[in-house]
Amino acid sequence: MNYLIGAFKPSCNISITFADGKSRKQVPIKKENGQTVMVPLFQSQENISGKISIEPLQGKKVEHNGVKIELLGQIEMYFDRGNFYDFTSLVRELDVPGEIYERKTFPFEFSTVEMPYETYNGVNVRLRYVLKVTISRGYGGSIVEYQDFVVRNYTPPPEINNSIKMEVGIEDCLHIEFEYNKSKYHLKDVIIGKIYFLLVRIKIKNMDLEIRRRESTGSGANTHVETETLAKFELMDGAPVRGESIPIRLFLSPYELTPTHRNINNKFSVKYYLNLVLVDEEDRRYFKQQEITVYRLPETS
C-alpha cells in the first residue's frame, strides 16, 4: 500500500521565486485551506520576473514533454466553483521535451504586464493573479505548481469631488437634512458631515451611520447580491430637538474596504453605501442610503 501511495507523489520539487522578492512589499492573502500567506504586491504595467527551479527527488529523473510558465488573471464565481474565467493569460515556454536528472533553473520574465483589475476576495467571487508552472507528461499526469501574487492599482485624487446634500422625511412627522463633505473617498479617508433636524414629531431613540458593501455577481436571472454591513457608527443616543445639528466624523482606515469595482469584466461589481438609520421608541427603523465611491491612493513609503 505504501508503495502505491509513493507512486503518485510528484517526482520533483518545483520552486518559484521572484527576482525582487526580498525587497518587494509583501501582503497577506487567505488560501482556500484557510491559511494566510504573505505574497508579493504588484501593480499594472510592472515587469514580473524571476526563476523556476526544478529538482528531481533523489534517485529519480523527470521525463517530460516540455516545461512552461503561465501568468493568469482569473475570476472564479463561488456558485460555479472550480471554473475559472481567464481575463489575462500569458505563456512562456521554458524547456523542450527531454529529461531532468538534477536541479535545473529557468529564468522567466513577463514585461509591462497589463493587470487592469485589483485582486479581490469577496463573498461570492474572487479575482486572483497566479503564476502556474506545468511540467507536461504523457503518463502519470502533468506536474503543476502555483504561486499567487497580489495586484493593487492606484488612482490620483479626483479633480471633481462634490459634497452630498440630501433631505429626507416623513410628512408632518420628521424632516432632516444631511450632508457629507465628499462623494468620493480614499481608503484611509475621513467622512465628515452633519445631520440637521428641521422637524421632529416622532420620538427618536438613536441614530447610526453604517458603511455597507454590496457585491453583485452574475447577470440577469443568475444575479447574486450580497450586502454586508462593515461598520456601524453611533451618531446620537436620545431624542433630538428641532434645530439640532449632529456632527459626523467617521474614519475609514479601521475597516477592510476595497476600492469600488464597477462591472469587472461583466462578471461582478462592488459598491459602497453610507446608510443613515434612525430608530424610534417603538423600534421602527427609518433609513436613507447614499452611494459613495471608494478609491486607492498611491502609497507613500
Image (tube, grey):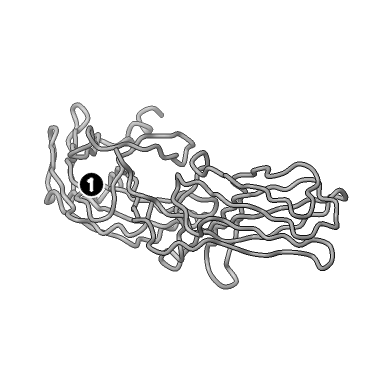
Could you tell me residue 47's position as x and y percent? 19, 50
- Name of the residue lying farthest toward the bottom: 220
Q: In this figure, which residue is indicated by the disc labeled 1?
A: 135
Q: Please tell me which residue is depicted at 41% across the width and 66% down the height of the picture.
A: 265
Q: Is residue 161 left or right of residue 203?
A: left
Q: Please tell me which residue is depicted at 27% across the width and 55% down the height of the picture.
A: 44
Which quarter of the rendered picture does the N terminus lie within? Answer: top left
Q: Please tell me which residue is depicted at 16% across the width and 49% down the height of the picture.
A: 109
Q: Please tell me which residue is depicted at 78% across the width and 49% down the height of the picture.
A: 240
102, above or below 95, in the image: above
Q: Is residue 237 left or right of residue 110?
A: right
Could you tell me residue 213's position as x and y percent? 56, 53
Please state which of residues 136 and 277 is positioned toward the viewer in this rendering: 277
Could you tell me residue 138's position as x and y percent? 24, 51
Q: Residues within 10 Å of mark 1 (few under 14, many from 20)?
A: many
What's the amino acid at mark 1? Ile
Please state which of residues 187 and 106 is positioned toward the viewer in this rendering: 187
Please state which of residues 59 and 47 is positioned toward the viewer in this rendering: 47
Tell me where residue 160 sits by quadrant: bottom left
104, above or below 88, in the image: above
Which quarter of the rendered picture does the C terminus lie within? Answer: top left
Q: Is residue 278 left or right of residue 178?
A: right
Q: Is residue 180 left or right of residue 155?
A: right
Disc 1, SS: strand
Could you tell me residue 232's position as x and y percent? 64, 44
Tell me where residue 166 sits by quadrant: bottom right
